Amino acid sequence: MELAFSGELWWWKGPAPWHFVTVADDECAALAAASAAVSYGWGMIPVTARIGATSWQTSLFPRDGRYLVPVKARVRTAEGIEVGDRVAVHLTLDV
């Protein structure tokens, strides 16, 4: 399964701060339907993500009926993106 959407990069200030892009609502429904077959626990879904020319492997975090894409520092640096920037994200589920 492959999905493409755009969203704003935001920063979670929790005890382990991290940057995320929230998956668009339409794609969340498809991910929720596929999660039982691909999740490895706690609803986490393994994916290969891409922003611009930079790809990385990660897992989507479920939160409040939606999914979050964690965006590593090396991706933000390589693509020149900062909190508040709207980015196009491509996801491929790793099954």
Image: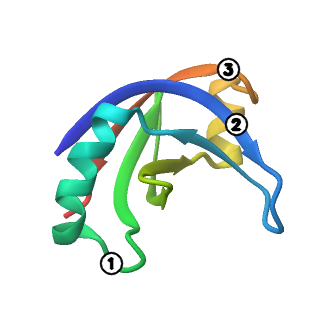
User: For this view, does 74 lie left or right of residue 43?
Assistant: right
Q: Nearer the viewer, residue 45 or 94?
A: 45
Position of residue 31 relative to residue 75, above or below, is below
**Secondary structure of residue under mark 1:** loop
Residue plotted at (35% across, 55% down): 47
Look at mark 1 in the image and give the residue it sits on.
Answer: 40
- Residue type at tag 3: Asp
Residue 85 place in picture, x, y as percent:
67, 20
Look at mark 3 in the image and give the residue it sits on.
Answer: 85
Q: Residues within 10 Å of mark 2 (few under 14, many from 20)?
A: some
Position of residue 54 relative to residue 7, above or below, is below
User: For this view, does 74 lie left or right of residue 6?
Assistant: right
Q: Nearer the viewer, residue 7 or 79?
A: 7
Look at mark 2 in the image and give the residue it sits on.
Answer: 10
User: For this view, does 69 lie left or right of residue 83?
Assistant: left
Q: Residue furthest bottom?
A: 41
How many numbered marks appear?
Answer: 3
Residue 62 place in picture, x, y as percent:
46, 60
- Residue type at tag 2: Trp
Asked if residue 52 can be seen in this view, the reply is no
- Residue type at tag 1: Tyr
User: For this view, does 16 lie left or right of residue 33?
Assistant: right
* Distance from the alpha carbon under mark 2 to that under mark 3: 8 Å
* Distance from the alpha carbon under mark 1 to that under mark 2: 25 Å
* Distance from the alpha carbon under mark 1 to that under mark 3: 30 Å
Q: Residues within 10 Å of mark 3 (few under 14, many from 20)?
A: few
